[in-house]
Image (cartoon, coloured by chain):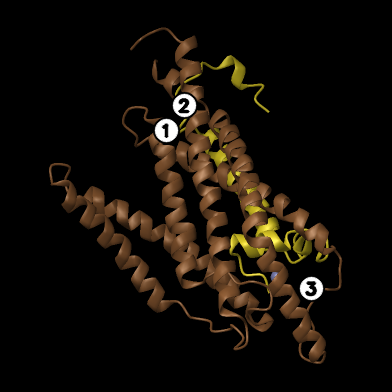
Chain colours: A brown, B yellow
Amino acid sequence: MPLTTTTPPFVAVLVRGLLAGLIAGLLAGVFAYVAGERHVEAAIAIEEASTHAEPAAGAHDHEDALVSRTGQRGGLFLATGLFGAAMGGLLATAYVLLSRRRRGDDDGRSGLLLAGAALLGAVIVPFLKYPANPPAVGDPATINQRTVTYLLMVVLGLVAVWAGSLGYRSVGAQAPTWLRAAAAVGGFLLVTAVSYVVMPSFQEVPADFPATLLWNFRLASLGTQVVLWTGIGLLFAALMHHERRRRAGTALPST
Amino acid sequence: MSSSASSQPVVHPVGSARLLWTVLATVAVLTLLAYLVAFDQGAVSRSGMYLHELMHDGRHLLGVPCH
Ligand SMILES: [Zn+2]
């Protein structure tokens, strides 16, 4: 079967996803370090100033120093690298599971599309509802609720992207492109809007927290995720392209 | 892990039962890894708050709720 030569085994795809994710995660760590670390520092300074001013009010566990601030800055790269590897591996798994539907072997294009879908559904949609918060923002009493609703929002964002692709495919292939695009955007926006309305909101930014610091931190946080997923998409596509050429080179020239 | 597979002819792998289990195990391990980075409070890793604090800046800058 010539199919085996164009469809690499699961483990081969997985390894490439993990590698792409690890490298992209480290790149995202570099971006986060350069663009975001000083905002984290500034927020921690505000947090410590407020806890020292009123030590009775809900003491925070940021300064009991299981890990020093230097350790946490280094841990940033560990966190983004491991998180990236996990996301790259999951992307590779989704790539293999969806490969049955794929016509032809446009490996680069579908890998990039998947990464774009993940960026939109798992990052941008949740971010606009529950934007990233620096230290000193957020009530520790609601952390469990906020974690659960954040994870739910990630799932709903992915459902919204899926609804978009469903809309695109439900309009026949002979329909004009603008109509298919409109159906995709409509399906995506419908699910997104409903989940934004249904999901609870949290207003927990302290009144005296600097607005520019909050904005700069959130931009840096969003940028970190954009670097991560752009990197995963491009690196995975490149590695799969290389793998495909390698396999095509060892196989009989059938095409 | 794949000692029995060497005798079988290699076919299009998607759809076999073994692949299904490999995929499920992979997803489980990767989800656990992401959990340890992004959400661990010591209950799963048995490391107290050590992992939580080590990953602290990464968690904030990846946009995950922290505290
Ligand atoms: Zn924190």
Task: Find disc 3 in the rendering and name its residue.
Answer: A62
Is the residue marked by circle 2 packed among few (<14), some (14-19), or many (20+) residues within 10 Å?
A: some
Asked if the residue at label 3 sits under 8 Å from ligand 1, the reply is yes
- Residue positioned 65% across, 49% down in the render: A30
Is the residue marked by circle 1 packed among few (<14), some (14-19), or many (20+) residues within 10 Å?
A: some
Could you tell me residue B57's position as x and y percent?
70, 62
Task: Find disc 2 in the rendering and name its residue.
Answer: A241
Quarter of the image with the C terminus of chain B is bottom right
* Residue A108: image tag: 1
Distance from the alpha carbon under mark 2 to that under mark 1: 6 Å
Circle 1 — which element? helix
- Residue A79 in the figure: left or right of residue A228: right
Q: Amino acid at mark 3?
A: His
Circle 3 — which element? loop
Confirm whether circles 3 and 2 share one chain.
Answer: yes
Distance from the alpha carbon under mark 1 to that under mark 3: 43 Å
Q: Amino acid at mark 1?
A: Gly
**Mark before the other along the chain sequence, 3 or 2:** 3
Is residue B46 in view from this perspective?
no
Circle 2 — which element? helix
Could you tell me residue B9's position as x and y percent?
51, 16
- Residue positioned 58% across, 46% down in the render: B27
Q: In terms of depth relative to the viewer, which is nearer, A5 or A139?
A: A139
Q: Quadrant of residue A88?
A: top right
**Mark before the other along the chain sequence, 1 or 3:** 3
Could you tell me residue A132's position as x and y percent?
57, 68
